[in-house]
Amino acid sequence: MARVALVTGGSRGIGLACARQLAEAGHRVAVTVRSEPPAELAALGVLAVPCDVTDSAQVDQAFSTIEAELDPVDILVSNAGITRDGLVLRMNDDDFSAVVDTNLTGGFRVAKRAVKTMMRARFGRIVFISSVVGTGGQAGQANYAASKAGLVGLARSFAKEFASRGITVNVVAPGPVATDMLDALNDDQVASIVDAVPLGRLGSPDDIAATVRFLASDEAGYITGAVIPVDGGLGMAG
């Protein structure tokens, strides 16, 4: 069944792949962007809406625009996120709070706005994009790991609170994925990461999006509160 889907941070990487796969599944898709959207979105018929998820007013306006242009949001993929990596002793309060505000509190803002109309429809699919570092931690990423770990508690609280309204809430936890976030690493660093993955390769954005696409479907209606690793086995290593 065709529904209205919103992907936050949908202009590149995992978010763009999710938007593409949801559009291919027949859904009417919108994405939030903070810069000029790629031409691919227009080619797919995807609605690009400016929005900074750290601003509640912008979140509300984005949803209002989507409701006017497409209809209320049935499927939310909370993907927008940032990194400000650094060792703990060099990480200042702003570096920590900015990442948490975008990745975790931003997820809360968009999910809270989404459930208002999902409750009336008695249907909803919410998928938070977390990370393998949310459970395993990572040196130099205390802020990012904390924000991604927090999404698990947030998702499961939403899942319990809104299950009676037909709303499912799940978490996808990617491992290392070939996106521009890895571009800052040199070949030796990337090789070291790949060596730690039992399947012996980086993931692709489409690997993540395929799982999101399933969780957004009617067939996934009996799955809620789950944390699904899509990490090539990295989370079980060691």
Image (tube, grey):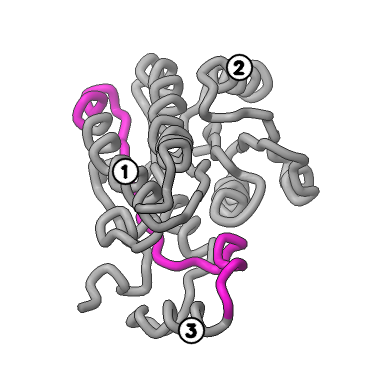
Q: Is residue 30 left or right of residue 229?
A: right
Disc 3, SS:
helix
Residue in front for this viewpoint, 92 or 180: 92
Asked if the residues shown at circle 3 and circle 1 are in contact, with their CB atoms under 8 angstroms apart, the answer is no
First in residue order: circle 3 vs circle 2: 2
Check disc 3 and report the residue beneath it.
191
Asked whether residue 117 is drawn in magenta, I would say no
Q: Decide: few, some or many residues near mark 3? Use Cα within 10 Å; few <14, some 14-19, many ≥20.
A: some
Would residue 164 be seen by someone viewing this image from the given angle? yes
Asked whether residue 179 is drawn in magenta, I would say yes
Residues rendered magenta in the picture: 160-186
Check disc 2 and report the residue beneath it.
61
Q: In the image, what residue occupies the spot 39% across and 58% down?
A: 87
Q: Is residue 234 left or right of residue 26?
A: left
What amino acid is labelled 2 in the image? Answer: Gln
First in residue order: circle 3 vs circle 1: 1
Q: Is residue 65 left or right of residue 172?
A: right
Check disc 1 and report the residue beneath it.
170
Disc 1, SS:
strand
Distance Cα–Cα, label 2 vs label 1:
25 Å
Disc 2, SS:
helix
What amino acid is labelled 1 in the image? Answer: Asn
Distance Cα–Cα, label 3 vs label 1:
31 Å
Q: Position of residue 142 (x, y in %)?
A: 34, 52
Residue in front for this viewpoint, 23 or 82: 82
